[in-house]
Image (spheres, grey):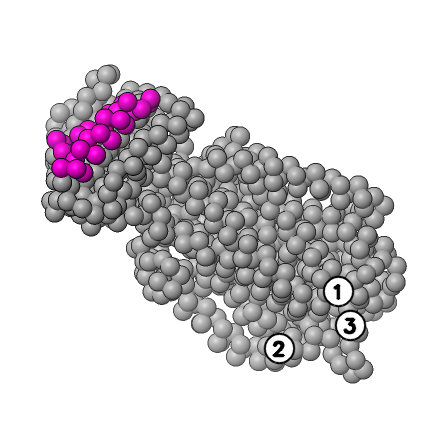
Amino acid sequence: MLTALARTATRRPLTVMLLWGLFLLLGFGLGTGVFARLSDNVPEVPGTESESAARYLEEMDPAGSSVTGVVAGTPVADAGLRAEVERAVADVREVAGVAAVPDPYATPGMIAEDGHALIVPVTLEGGLDDDAEERTLDAAAERIREIDAPDVHVSGGPLLGLQMGERAQQDVKNAELISLPVVLALLLVVFGGLRSALLPLVVAVSGIAGAFLALFLFSEVTDISVYAIQVTTMLGLGLAVDYALLMLVRFREERRTTEDVVEAVHRTVAAAGRTVLFSGLTVAVSLTGLLVFPSVFLRSMGLAVAAVVVIDMLAALTLLPALLVRFGGRIPPAKTPRNGEEEGRFFARVARFAARRKVAVLAVTVPVLLVLALPVPGMSIAVGDARQLPADSEARQLQDTVAAHFPPGTGVSPVVVVARPGTDDATADRIRALGLGATTRELPDGGAVIEIRPPGEADGAEATALVERVREVRGDAPVEVTGTAARLVDFREMLAERAPWAALTVLAGIVVLLFAFTGSVLLPLRTVVTTLLSLAAALGVVVWVFQDGHLAGLLGAEGLGALSLTAPPLIVAIAFGLAMDYELFILARMREARLRSGDDQEAVVTGLSRSGRVVTCAALLLAVVFAAFMTGGFSPILQIGLGLTLAVLIDATVVRMLLVPATMALLGRHAWWAPRPLRRAHERFGVREEQPELPREKVPSGV
């Protein structure tokens, strides 16, 4: 397959480039339409109790969405301000699609006790389509913002989702403006020439276009989260640079032994292309674990990110070879080591040190990683609210204003209890007694809705405890609980139930792929263990910073007491796949050296000396991309960005440079062992590049 791809790219380079050019136009033209389709309905899980109750309410009580306006910064009793507010309320009531706007001066609880703020709630009609709802929101919000007061903010409900989507779009643009020049500068340092440095960026831009197009296509059949744009773009950009870097380094090495550019491209695709192929497959397999979860958000993210990985892989295996055929003749070959000078001598020294001091290396690095991972058992997740946005965002300013002027719990989404027909009065009374100020309204079918406002946040510990308490006291009555807290409880239960199956799916796929790549049974197991160590360490730091609040201010964030429920599953899935990238980069070189020399110990040193520079540069470039996405101030993306940045850096340094050679030296020749039946299966079905035939006595057993 790789040979066929290489021949296609070398025979028809202009055709390949033209097709990718059309793909770019499609991605940046049609694909960017996904920005208008982003959703913030992350915690919804089909089939759960909270989702069932929500659908029942939509049928029985089709109430419209609501948004909130806050006017503050001046005494609200001022006659001029009161006249302005009353005119605005009257105008908003006349907006098509608005169902109700209560007079804040005549409605209890709408004016702050300090007299310096008031709330203007706006309820929309039920049954509005998306376009009509957006028009109504824009008109109502714009009219409220025209009130002449120091602080006027409008957000909440569907408007909060729109504001998050706009923030996501702006953050993506800013991150690209920051990361692309920095990546280009680093590539110039790595290659020492503009032409070589630009080629990875061409592949990276293709990856970004693919991210947009994949998300747009998936938005036709499922909801796409506001987080999807940033996650897929950062990964698409980073992996594209990684794959292009690996291919270019190998191409320059092949140019040392042949002046024929086409032949150098063929050799590059046959060797490095195999690594790119398996790397892309392992990252994609790592993301298939997200498909095990019934959450629409997790499934759509898994599919979208896997699609982007495949696009990056295809670009590296088709577009880049075509570009090399056209422009590779002007790219200088890699420098030949001077007489007596070892190639990659720094990494060779590190490998020899780790191999000689294998027990000491393991005794130091493993405990350090475990210490960093200590906060992980105490990790908590939450849906989150406007506090996840930067302080200068309108939604965040509205929430801060309400918190400053109104009692705790004001504006907090209630725990919604749906008592279907047949619920006895005693059960309903016990449920109402669980919270102060519980309200009840009848439904057309004889059922009822009981709303209980919890203390603290809508998804805080008190709210989730209230949900669990309601589910305890209802007994066998036909009662269901929904709302923000109930969705969070159901999401957590879904994660706990499906996580073992997701892990089993991913680990099985990774083990099979690594066996096909190496022909070893022990290497996949060693790889999984060391990767989990680096992943746990990175996730532990994220918990320490964003949940516990340590040093969060340095990133423009704050400790929220819990991580965004989007962050942990995405960090785990993506970081695990990225770790496989670097493992394969190193193992590919080790395997080549072992096939040539038959010396297991020296193969470890040679493999790391030839791959260490690529892995280090790739990790640095990927870390730059992830770090650029941490400049936007959106807490879930900050969490994902920090987690992936740390996972990449820890894995590419501590794990791949120290733990890998140490564990390989500890295993010795057994590292490449496989039972005879599996060894025969690998010899028959395993995918491998063509290698020069070695004398029989030098061919290592187990390959």
**Type of amino acid under label 1:** Glu
Which quarter shows the N terminus? top right
* Residue farthest top in this picture: 445
Q: Mark 1 or 3 closer to N-term?
A: 3
Q: Is residue 245 above or below residue 107?
A: below
- For this rendering, which residue is in front, 655 or 613? 613
Tag 1–tag 3 contact (CB < 8 Å)? no
Tag 1–tag 2 contact (CB < 8 Å)? no
Horizontal placement of 261 versus 118: left or right? right
Q: Mark 1 or 2 closer to N-term?
A: 2
Report which quarter residue 517 is drawn in.
Answer: bottom right
Q: Mark 1 or mark 3: which is in front?
A: 3
Question: Which residue is painted at 79% across and 62% down in the image?
Answer: 331
Report which quarter residue 129 is drawn in.
Answer: top left
- Identify the residue under disc 2: 350
Residue 519 on image: x %, y %: 69, 57
Which quarter shows the C terminus? bottom right
Mark seen at residue 592: 1
* Disc 3: CA contacts within 10 A as few (<14), some (14-19) or many (>=20): few
Horizontal placement of 256 versus 40: left or right? right
Q: Mark 3 or 2 closer to N-term?
A: 3
**Type of amino acid under label 2:** Val
- Identify the residue under disc 3: 335
Q: Which residues are magenta?
A: 79-107
